[in-house]
Amino acid sequence: MANIWTTNFEQLFRNRVSEEQVARVLQLIATMPNRREQPTQGDLPGKFDFWFDGGAVQTITGWDEYDLADGTQVTVKSIPFLSATIQFSNGSCVRIRQESPEV
């Protein structure tokens, strides 16, 4: 019986996104290293408003859509409260949402 529990428990965490993965994505979109208005060699192709080392952004009124070099996509909404949805290239999704206006 313990062996079945261990196997099921391990399967639950097999595809779990780590805090480190989430922090890396948030740090990248927060700092946007070497942000630029025009793409340079090696940047992601497509219709973006600006690029940075590791990704590109399309700005839409009220939210930004980030495409990262590793295939991760992030949507950050700022109206009325901050929320972010991180869609990792393996299909895993993490959502972060401000619940109230208090800081």
Image (cartoon, grey):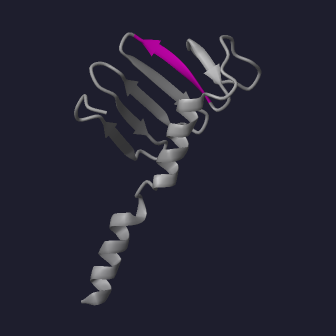
Q: How many circles with numbers are drawn on the protein?
A: 0
Give the x, y percent position of residue 76: 40, 27
Location of residue 70 (image quadrant): top right
Q: Residue at x 47, y 14 (%)?
A: 59
Magenta residue check for 58: yes
Relative to 32, is 88 above or below? below
Q: Residue at x 55, y 44 (%)?
A: 24
Give the x, y percent position of residue 57: 53, 20
Relative to 15, is 62 above or below? above
Location of residue 12 (image quadrant): bottom left
Check the image and name the residue furthest to the front: 103
Magenta: main secondary structure: strand
For the C terminus, the quadrant is: top left
Q: Residue at x 27, y 81 (%)?
A: 5
Magenta residue check for 81: no
Span of residues in magenta: 55-60
Give the x, y percent position of residue 65: 45, 23
Q: Residue at x 54, y 36 (%)?
A: 71
Residue 55 seen: yes
Left or right placement of residue 95 versus residue 43 in this view: left
Check the image and name the residue furthest to the right: 41
Relative to 60, is 74 above or below? below
Left or right placement of residue 40 versus residue 101 in this view: right
Give the x, y percent position of residue 75: 41, 28
